Image (cartoon, rainbow, N blue to C red):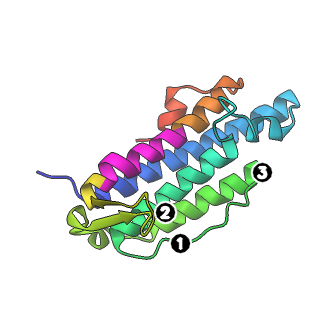
Amino acid sequence: MTISMYNASVPVFKQMLTALSEVLAKAEAHVAEKNIEPNALLQARLFPDMFPLVRQVQIAADFTKGVTARLAGVDVPSWPDTEVTFADLQALIAKALDHIGSFDAAQFDGSENKEIILRPGTPKEKKLGGSAYLQHYGLPQFFFHVTTAYAILRHNGVNLGKRDYMGAY
């Protein structure tokens, strides 16, 4: 038996975005409790050449909307990356959850064989089948940014564990 492209993507994104939202809520409570300037966490990085927490969350949301839209055969929505506060990030995650909640499984039928073109018309153009796009590009990219957001917060003293990262499953 094979797993559907919908089941391999949308429920996974929902689980992890919901967990990320809860992790961010803990981070916000942490800064309030410790009387820390929120930007100390929002702009924190694991290393100077890496993106800060805000950008990690934005990219995770971008992969959520992009992967699901491409597999469902609809235009990828364009959202400006203007988030600067914990509340902004929570609103972004809610928007991403609403976006993926708008799809039904039938929209993903046959998407495992659909050609997905990344960065079309550029020297970095890459063509992938839908299954490879999801399994070898979209999900790994998404998990990288969710994990990095978690690691930034954990590294900066927010009391988090694996259960927080995983969320409800």
Q: Which residue is mark 2?
A: 65
**Residue 79 image position (x, y, % from top left):** 62, 68
Quadrant where the C terminus sits is top left
In the rendered image, which residue does mark 3 sit on?
Answer: 85
Residue 4 seen in the current view? yes
Q: Is residue 111 above or below residue 153?
A: below
CA neighbours of label 1 inside 10 A, class few (<14), some (14 to 19), many (20+): few
Q: Which residue is situated farthest in the front direction here?
A: 123
Q: What predominant SS class does the magenta segment belong to? A: helix
Q: Secondary structure at mark 2?
A: helix
Q: Earlier in the sequence, mark 2 or mark 1?
A: 2
- Numbered circle sitting on residue 27: none
Q: How many marks?
A: 3
Tag 2 near tag 1, CB within 8 Å? yes
> Residue 77, labelled with which disc?
1
Q: Which residues are magenta?
A: 133-146
Rendered location of residue 120, percent (x, y): 42, 68
